[in-house]
Amino acid sequence: MKLIMPVLATACLLQACGNNQPKEEVAGKTETTENIIDSTSPLKPVIITDTVEFDTDDPAIWLHPTDKAQSLIIGTDKETGGGIYAFDLNGKIVRKLTGLKRPNNIDLAYGLMINGKPTDIAVFTERKANKIRIVSLPDLEFIDNGGIDIFKGEKGEGFNEGMGVALYTSPEKKIYAIVGRKTGPLEGYLWQYELNGDKGTVTANVVRKFGKYSGKKEIEAIAVDNEAGYVYYSDEQSGIRKYYADPAKGNEELAFFGTTGFADDHEGISIYKTGDTTGYILISNQQDNSFMVYPREGSGSIHQHDLITKIPMSTLESDGSDVTNVSLNAQFPKGLFVAMSNGKVFHYYDWRDLEKRILKK
């Protein structure tokens, strides 16, 4: 496994694998934000990234501490031999780390103490190694002493193959990784690990096992609302489940929503914040090539989440996504929404374009 510095692609021809419709897209190209024709037309990205080698899966947005225009999108290339890639805000690859055993989902956190030094980290699952891996940001250097074994002692087929992961930073600045897998028991499907860097490399201890599972397919997409203290995950072909992110608050299921209106799989989850408790939860309706939008603050009550609208997207069968409300540059003044698309790419959207669709309802 080695770190390779910038590799730039100029163009790519995308094949819509699930729709059998070829689509030509130029890597890194920019579209105008004035691209909304009507609420039923697919929303177009303003940037399409360079291509990865195998199959993009899940992105996470890293915010630069002093110059937001230097922020990065960290995304996975999901295949044996694949890796993680860092893209700039123009969609160009600036770093990559390859030769991994099927990296799947990724998330990041800020300020994990490593030998007393605050360090930004990305955590991703390495599915065929049965591990989570941790790298420092923005350099993509491993700080996990070869990786952390997950779901130790589990015997069922696929029970220890890590897929989804999300990081929770508590008010006390403890950082936890919440990890899902290819399959598992109907109770206690997710395992939560507390991360520790006191010895110079990151270690992890299991602090709880929680979460219901329908048994229908798998649980891959997981997202944490740090400020509100909730974790959401997509129980594919079933719905979205909501729990407390803090293990001390117990394992009660707080909500189960989005059970209708999906073509097939429930996938990527992103949370856009408009205030301390307000905003939107966006869920990929994968085979419909759309994102379902729900209120972050709830519908009447905090744990009732009724559909606000559905936004058709240009992403093809999107697995993973992320969003930020931070102003990054002139192109993304109210934040950026990034989503995986078939064709080995990620799509960048100007949040203002999604906002127009949401507020129009």
Image: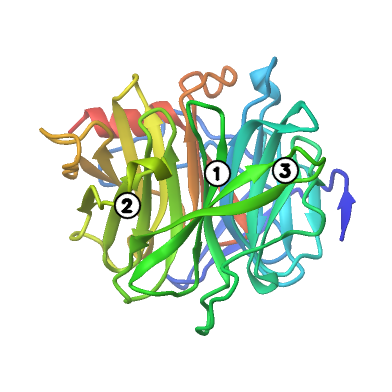
Separation (CA) of disc 2 from disc 3: 35 Å
Inspect this view and state whether residue 167 appears: yes
Q: What residue is rendered at 65% in x and 51% in y?
A: 204
Residue 18 appears left or right of 116: left
Disc 2, SS: loop
Question: Disc 3 residue type?
Answer: Ala
Residue 298 appears left or right of 28: left
Question: Disc 1 residue type?
Answer: Tyr
- In terms of sequence position, does the residue under pointer 1 or pointer 2 come before the other? 1
Badge 2 local density, few (<14 within 10 Å), some, or many (20+)?
Answer: some
Q: Is residue 223 above or below residue 21?
A: above
Residue 290 appears left or right of 123: left
State the residue position of label 3: 86
Number of numbered labels in the structure image = 3
Q: Position of residue 59 (x, y in %)?
A: 58, 47
Q: What residue is rendered at 39% in x and 37% in y?
A: 271
Q: Position of residue 297 (x, y in %)?
A: 24, 31
Separation (CA) of disc 1 from disc 2: 15 Å
Given residues 83 and 9, the one toward you in this image is 83
The image quadrant of residue 118 is: top right
Residue 76 appears left or right of 39: right
Q: Is residue 172 above or below residue 242?
A: above
Badge 1 local density, few (<14 within 10 Å), some, or many (20+)?
Answer: many
Inspect this view and state whether residue 42 appears: no
Quarter of the C terminus within the rendering: top left
Disc 3, SS: strand
State the residue position of label 2: 251
Given residues 41 and 74, the one toward you in this image is 74
State the residue position of label 1: 176
Disc 1, SS: strand
Q: Position of residue 293 (x, y in %)?
A: 28, 42
- In terms of sequence position, does the residue under pointer 2 or pointer 3 come before the other? 3
